[in-house]
Amino acid sequence: MNVVFHVSSADLGDWRHAIRNVRNLLDDETVETDTVTLLANGDAALLFLDDSPVRDRLDSLFEAGVRCCACRNSLDGRGFDADRLADGVEVVPSGVGELVTRQAAGDAYLKVP
C-alpha cells in the first residue's frame, strides 16, 4: 500500500505530530507499505528547511525511505529557495497537485494532525 501524509500547519507541535504519525506507521509490523510520502504545503513547507526545529527528526524518515515533498508554490510564496531545504527533500510544483495525483493513483490519504 502507498500512503501520503499531508501537513499544512505552521504549528511546531503539528509538525512533530505528523512525523510521529509517519514513524508509527513505519514501525507497525501489521501494515505493509510500499511508498510512504510526507507532503508539506502552506506554512508546513518550512518544516523541511535545513535549519528547521525538527530537522533532526527527518534523518530517520529519509533512512526509512520516506519520500519527503515540499510544495514549490508554498516555498516561493514565503520567499524561500529550494536550496535551503534539507538534503533528500523533493520539491513538487504544487502540494495540492501532488495530493490529487497520489490519491488518483490509489494512495491512502492522511491529513495530519
Image (spheres, rainbow, N blue to C red):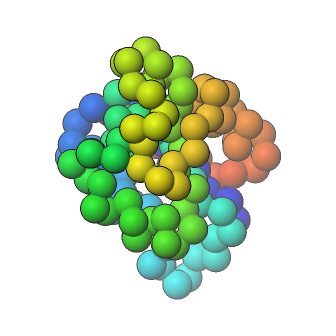
Q: Position of residue 6 (x, y in %)?
A: 48, 42
63 up-or-down from 5: above or below:
below
Give the quarter of the image for residue 23. Answer: bottom left
Q: Position of residue 76 (x, y in %)?
A: 47, 19
35 up-or-down from 38: above or below:
below
Give the quarter of the image for residue 69. Answer: top right
81 up-or-down from 19: above or below:
above
Give the quarter of the image for residue 46. Answer: top left
Left or right: where 102 falls relative to 37: right
The structure residue drawn at horizontal position 27% and vertical position 45%, both measured from the top left corner, is 52
Q: Where, quadrant-wise, is the N terminus in this rendering?
A: bottom right
Left or right: where 104 falls relative to 110: right
Q: Position of residue 24 (x, y in %)?
A: 40, 70
The extreme front residue here reads 83
The structure residue drawn at horizontal position 36% and vertical position 52%, both measured from the top left corner, is 18
Q: Where, quadrant-wise, is the C terminus in this rendering?
A: top left
The extreme bottom residue here reads 29
The structure residue drawn at horizontal position 62% and vertical position 34%, both measured from the top left corner, is 92
Q: Position of residue 20 (x, y in %)?
A: 33, 62
Residue toward you, 30 or 77: 77
The structure residue drawn at horizontal position 48% and vertical position 34%, both measured from the top left corner, is 82
- Whether residue 69 is visible here, answered yes or no, is yes
